[in-house]
Amino acid sequence: MQASIVAVSGSRSSLGYPGAEELRMLRAIAQLALLEAARHGEYRATFHGFSVLARRQCPIPGDGVVVAVNLCVRLGRTIVERSLVHTMDSAVMEQIP
């Protein structure tokens, strides 16, 4: 997954763009959100003004290994990223040797 906003070195600039460290942390949170939503149905988190929401589309994972998850990342009221992500079902992944 790639961030959709421009990064600048150091801390936030006067325009409010997040720094490289914030983008790395946001990426880690989004990846965790995808895995947790695939397993439990939904995951929410906030970080430095960002909010991350991930929801699994189907109520219970089927026999398949791939699960569809809606991901929405916001900065305040602005949508930074909205995606439908197909990810591996984490319960099935744990059983694969």
Image (tube, helix red, strand yellow):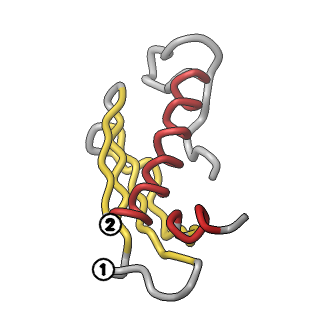
Q: Are marks 2 and 1 in contact (CB under 8 Å)?
A: yes
Look at 45% across and 15% down and name the residue there.
14
- Amino acid carrying label 1: it is Pro
Residue 41: assigned label: 2
Quarter of the picture containing the C terminus is bottom right
x, y percentage for residue 91? Answer: 50, 66
Which quadrant of the view contains residue 15?
top left
x, y percentage for residue 22? Answer: 51, 25
Look at 32% across and 41% down and name the residue there.
45
Residue that carries the numbered disc 1 in the rendered image: 59
Tell me if residue 30 comes above or below residue 22 in the rendering.
below
In the image, 5 versus 40, the foreground residue is 40
Tell me if residue 5 comes above or below residue 94 in the rendering.
above
Tell me if residue 19 comes above or below residue 2 in the rendering.
above
Look at 48% across and 75% down and name the residue there.
68
* Furthest residue in direction top, as rendered: 10
- Amino acid carrying label 2: it is Gly
